Amino acid sequence: MLRSRRFWLGMIFGLSLLALFLYGTDFAELGSALGKAQYAYLPAAVAVYFVAVAFRTLRWRYLLVPLKKVPSGRLFPIVVIGYMANNLLPARLGEVVRAYIVGEKEGISKAAALATAIVERLFDGLALVILLLVLAPLVPLRGISAQWTSAGLVLALLLISGAIVVLLALLFLAALSSRAAQAMGRIGLRLVPRRFQGRVRELGILFYSGLEAMRMPGPLLAVVVLSFLVWLAEFSMYYLVALAFPLGRPFWEIAFGGTAANLAISVPSLPGGVGPFEVAFLGSLLHFGADRGLASAYIIVLHATVLLPVTVLGLAFLWRENLSLSRIARPIRDEIALHEKQK
């Protein structure tokens, strides 16, 4: 019931933000901007996006090293399948999907693999927070107190950034101190019904093994560097899509909007981050003085270019592996049902 409630809250929140994005839009102007766009830039943008996916794959490989040295070529399809699942399923279940597949294919703990996926996402967030701090001094402050959208966006970004930093700090503390990890585990077990505590404790130990790379200076440095390369490539892709529209915005403004949008999709919403992505990006561009119709058209095309190619390729990889999302979900669901019967 709780899961269902969270699902519907995310759906309602995402739809509300999508309505906010469309509110006040001149649809004739939006249609005109979409009709005049120079879509010849999109193939290059898609290619650059997959460079970012390749960087993500290499980063995950470094996090998996303590568990098993998996070649990047074997990980790339799994990463793409994970992004496809994130775009089609709620609650960012793509991280669970790729942890399950890599566990099955490579014979490693799925809980440990999930820990590496979570750490990877938090390093994504940390890189975005640092980029936000670097770009913030360039943002004009005029009118920010008078525009509730700008003020609300700033508050939301501060809260999300703070949560990311705190979570990553806790994981670092757990990784570096077994006593701290045990203390966190004891606190966490108090929140779990008694009949599940044994299994949760076992999963916690496996999850902890997935944090091993955070204690290794070499892989950790590689993960940090690759996190910034990921976003440099992805924001370059955003800029290529922007060239299809006469926005006339510099790279750093596009990068700031992309930073805000990707931090915003940390909150529960529709699959693919639809809703928060659009509102945060539009709020940023409007604050910089962009035309609303052009900015809205750009964001719609950008998000479609981010979501569609990787989703199609992920489905193709899933088919090649003779898998389906329902087939992956079945053993996970069966395992949950088994433990619910245990006392």
Image: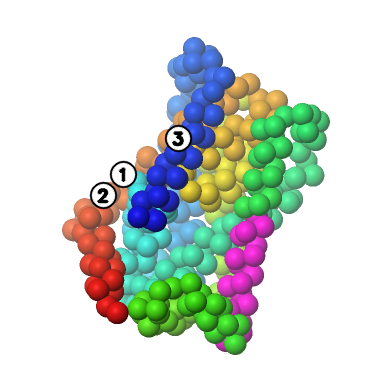
Task: State which quadrant residue 248 falls in.
Answer: top right
Q: Which residue is drawn at 36% across and 51% down?
A: 4
Query: In this orientation, does residue 250 appear?
Result: no
Q: In this view, does 271 lie above or below 323?
A: above
**Residue 281: x %, y % from top left:** 59, 36
Question: As drawn, is 296 to the left or to the right of 108?
Answer: right
Q: Is residue 127 shown above or below 244?
A: below
- The single residue placed furthest to the left in the displayed view is 322
Instruction: Please name the residue shown 62% across and 52% down the image.
Output: 160
- State the residue at coordinates (76%, 33%): 144
Identify the magenta region.
Answer: 161-178
Which numbered marker is on residue 15?
A: 3
Which mark, by number, is residue 99?
none
Label 1 near label 2: C-beta < 8 Å? yes
Whether residue 164 appears in magenta in the rendering, the answer is: yes
What's the residue type where badge 2 is placed?
A: Ala
Question: Residue 137: in sight, yes or no?
Answer: yes
Residue with the mark numbered 2: 316
Viewer-nearest residue: 65 or 215: 215
| Amino acid type, label 3 | Leu
Q: Residue furthest top?
A: 28
* In-image side of 92 versus 225 (left or right): left
Q: For residue 10, what is the image quadrant?
A: top left
In percent of width and height, residue 226 lies at: 56, 62
Q: Say which label, 3 or 2, has the lower sequence index.
A: 3
Q: Depth check: give the residue in front, 196 or 97.
A: 196
